[in-house]
Structure formats: C-alpha cells, structure tokens
Image (cartoon, rainbow, N blue to C red):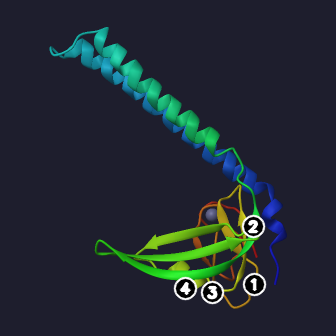
Amino acid sequence: MSYSQKISDPRFDQYLKNTRDYRYQFGFILTIVAVVGFYIYGETSSDMDNPEALHIGLGIGGMFFLIGLYAAFSGKKNAPTWDGEVVEKEIVKKNGRTYFVVYFENEKGNRHEISAEKDPTLYDYYKIGEKVRYHGKLKSYEKFDKSHDDIIFCNACAFMHDMEEHICQNCGCPLLK
Ligand SMILES: [Zn+2]
C-alpha cells in the first residue's frame, strides 16, 4: 500500500512531450491546409479572388497556428500535485442524462471532481474515505491503496488495465502500482 515510485519514470515525460509535439504539429497542418485551401479557392472560384481569399486563409490559418501553440504550451505548465481523499459520490440526473460524479478534497480543503456520463466505472472504482494523490503534470489521480482492486487506469492516457499488467498497452507508460 503506497503511492508508486514509478511516477518519476522518464516515459511519463516522453509521453507529455509527444502530446505537446502532436498538438503543435496538428495546429501547423491545419494552418497549411487553410492557407493553401483558400488560395486555391481564390484561384478557381468566381466568388472570390486572390489576394482576398489568401488573406482570409492566412487569418484562419494564423488562428489554427495560435490554437496549436496554446494547446502545446498550456500542457507544459505543471499543475501542483496534492494529496487528498474521496469525500463524496453522487449520481446526478440532468436533462435526461446521468452523470457519475466523484468528489475529492485536498489537505487545504479544496474540492475537485471527476464526472463521467453514463459510465459508472470510476464511480465504482473510488470509495469514500480513500486516500488519493493528484499528479499535476499528468492531471490524473492515483489511489494510495490498490490492494482490493482488479483494475487500474493508466495515469497518462486513462486507458483501463487489468491489475496484473505493468505497462500501459495504449501509450507505453508504466502503470502506477
Ligand atoms: Zn497509457
């Protein structure tokens, strides 16, 4: 029973870096598509000519580029890691939808929640009174006591695994156990 030492494994940092790179590249590709797309539109359509179409393409492309940059950068800022516990669970029915909500409270008394629509897996996974650690850089929770569990979630990509596993099949990060 403990929090896993594997949190310092370099594969987590590699995973985060890959995610940032992917967001950045995705924004860059959308930028190119917008600029080239509008340019071709300006050349071929009778509705709009270049450079007007190209200017619109540059405007929209620039926006995609900034969004990609923002997504990559905002992921880099590490939220703090804190210890807390499960304080409340609730099934909320709203507008004909069902949400399974788990509430955590940290040492400073701040509340955090996770909510899943339709899916009670996490709701069942966490028991009231259990100690948890929130890993800021991975934005996910780790239970202190995993000894009664049959399943475990990857703290990097949230992929669910059998307790016997050691490495995430989805992203290659070690499972925190
Ligand atoms: Zn994973």
Q: Residue furthest left?
A: 46
Q: Is residue 156 above or below residue 70?
A: below
Q: Earlier in the sequence, mark 2 or mark 4?
A: 2
Q: Is residue 31 above or below residue 87?
A: above
Q: Which residue is mark 2?
A: 108
**Does mark 3 have its CB less than 8 Å from ligand 1?**
no
5 lies left or right of 160: right
- Quarter of image, res 158: bottom right
Marking on residue 127: 3
**What secondary structure is marked by label 4?**
helix
- Quarter of image, res 47: top left
Q: Is residue 7 above or below residue 32?
A: below
Inspect the image, locate mark 2, and give the three-letter code of the amino acid beneath it.
Lys
> Which-is-in-front pick, marks 3 and 1?
3
| Residue neighbourhood size for the residue with mark 4, other residues' Cα within 10 Å, grouped as few (<14), some (14–19), many (≥20) | few
Q: Which residue is mark 1?
A: 145
Q: Which residue is mark 4?
A: 124
